Image (cartoon, rainbow, N blue to C red):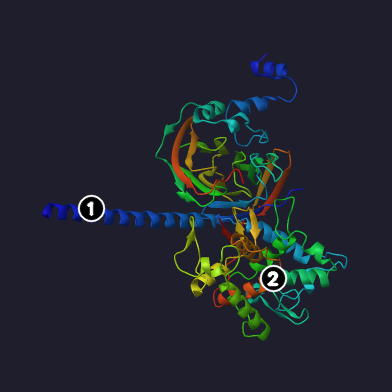
Amino acid sequence: MIARLRIAAAIALGVTAVAIGGAFAQSSTVDEIAKYREALQDGNPAELWEARGEEMWTTPRGPKRVSFATCDLGLGPGVVKGAYAALPRYFADAKSVMDLETRLVWCMVNQQGISEGDATKIKFGDGSARRSDLEALAAYVTSQSRGVEMKVPVNEPHVRDMYRLGEQMFFYRGGTHDFSCATCHGEDGKRIRLQDLPNLTKTEGAQKAYTTWPAYRVSQGELRTFQWRLNDCFRQQRFPDLVFGSEASIALTTYLAGRANGAPYNGPAIKR
Amino acid sequence: MDTTRRHALKTGGGVTLLTLLAAAGWLKPGEAAAEDWNKAAFETKSMDETMKALGGGAPATSADIIFFSTPDIAENGAVVPIGITSKIANTQSIAILVEKNPNMLAAVFDIPAGTDTSLSTRIKMGQTSNVYALVKADGKYHVASKEIKVTLGGCGG
Amino acid sequence: MADPMKIRANVVGDSTEVKVLMNHEMETGQRKDAQGKTIPAWFIQNVKVTHNEKVVLNAQWGPAVAKNPFLSFKFKGGAKGDKVKITWTDNRNDTRTDEATIA
């Protein structure tokens, strides 16, 4: 009887030891991945996109031969510094709430005379043969908000409506797998394989996530924006394609950007 | 007639003296023929083959070759940061080899006098593998290795 | 004409630290496109760095160097205002040279 108890105790201790060992192994994996991410920070290829975008910003283009110097991103015509940290916002001339890309397209169409089809021909670049002007411009504009505190005007009535719509969308379950954004991003400690997923329902998680897009995505070998990130999330949830610049994309962006208010913007970043 | 010149004449156009010198081993830093590329060395599948293409013998393991800012796990094999410092006197060059890549040799850096024998770059790894830092100093080869786990291979897209 | 590199050269103690980002696909020749055709290898083979015409680094690369390559190293000497020049040549005989002023 006592011998059996001793054996049971020994087994219990053994099991606990293995469990603790497992936890250690997991935390060291997380540490190592953190080291990988840190080692990537030195020398971000996003700078190559920033340089291209900067040149594009000041070069006259389109049938009307106009540069982006007249493009108002919310802080005045041609003002880039800090503009991204205050987007999305309502633009009276367009009568809608716009994120960075939709605003850039608006300027290209309405000021430079470029057709919407041409302006959005390559939304997401693929190698040096298929480059996206929008991604380069986004890299440049967002780089000019580095360190600036996020200040999406969530109290402005139009923006507030978009925010609320985005919030509803975040928790809305649908698609073939009955997923919502919250399915992956609504709890602590979730991961897909080795990717830990930020909890976007918590301020800290939301701030860290939003302020690091756009980012040079190592696995893509490209600079990707928040429009891309949402589009890819929809793909991963087996949702229908999220249309580029659609009201749906802007609503979600407004919600997630607004949740990041108060935190310094940190992009363009570099991610796996 | 000196043999090198005879050889150059025999092999005809396109093969210059400098090409032959390059193929025999490392290029000397500062020479104008920086455009030469040791094709054979970049197509080897094993340490033995690589050493043969580089014109050296088996390297001795050295504790004076250190990896820095080199993580144990790469989230994506497409971009793996590698930092190498050689504390070996008279280091002439540092090469990076990845054991399980389709071809082992990733890069070779010729380091002239006056340049630090320490550098960092980024390589691609197809899968979890040993990575070798191969140092040539005083004509002799030394090596250190580190295993890097890759969670997503970086060669095939 | 290939895209420009981003070069940073800074005085650090009695040395100059050089960090460079290059614009290059560094295609391995292992990938296949959507039609199943192999995408041909296209990568930087040689890199040369000079400071005031003196070679401070010479490299031979294979396709296993990552896309949009990054390189960081230091050399002794170099003063504010000096020029650091970097040239790369790839397997298509394309080449690019950029210069930076040491800060």
- Circle 1: element type: helix
Q: Is residue A49 left or right of residue B116?
A: right
Counting from the top left corner in percent of width and height, residue A118 is at 81, 62
Q: Nearer the viewer, residue A90 or A199?
A: A199
State the image quarter where residue A70 is shown.
bottom right
Q: Nearer the viewer, residue B154 or B30?
A: B154
Q: Residue furthest top?
A: B1
* Neighbourhood count class around disc 2 (C-alpha, 10 Å): few under 14, some 14–19, many 20 upward: many
What amino acid is found at the position of numbered circle 1 in the picture?
A: Ile
**Chain of the residue on which disc 2 is drawn:** A
The residue tagged 2 is A100
Q: Are marks 2 and 1 on the same chain?
A: yes
What amino acid is found at the position of numbered circle 2 in the picture?
A: Leu
Q: Nearer the viewer, residue B80 or B77?
A: B77
Q: Is residue C71 above or below residue C60?
A: below
Q: Nearer the viewer, residue A232 or A61?
A: A232
State the image quarter where residue B113 is shown.
top right
Distance, label 2 to label 1, CA atoms, is 59 Å
Q: Which mark is residue A254?
A: none
Q: Is residue B119 above or below residue A109?
A: above
Counting from the top left corner in percent of width and height, residue B147 is at 44, 43
**Does any portion of residue A90 appear in the rendered image?**
yes
Q: Which mark is residue A11?
A: 1
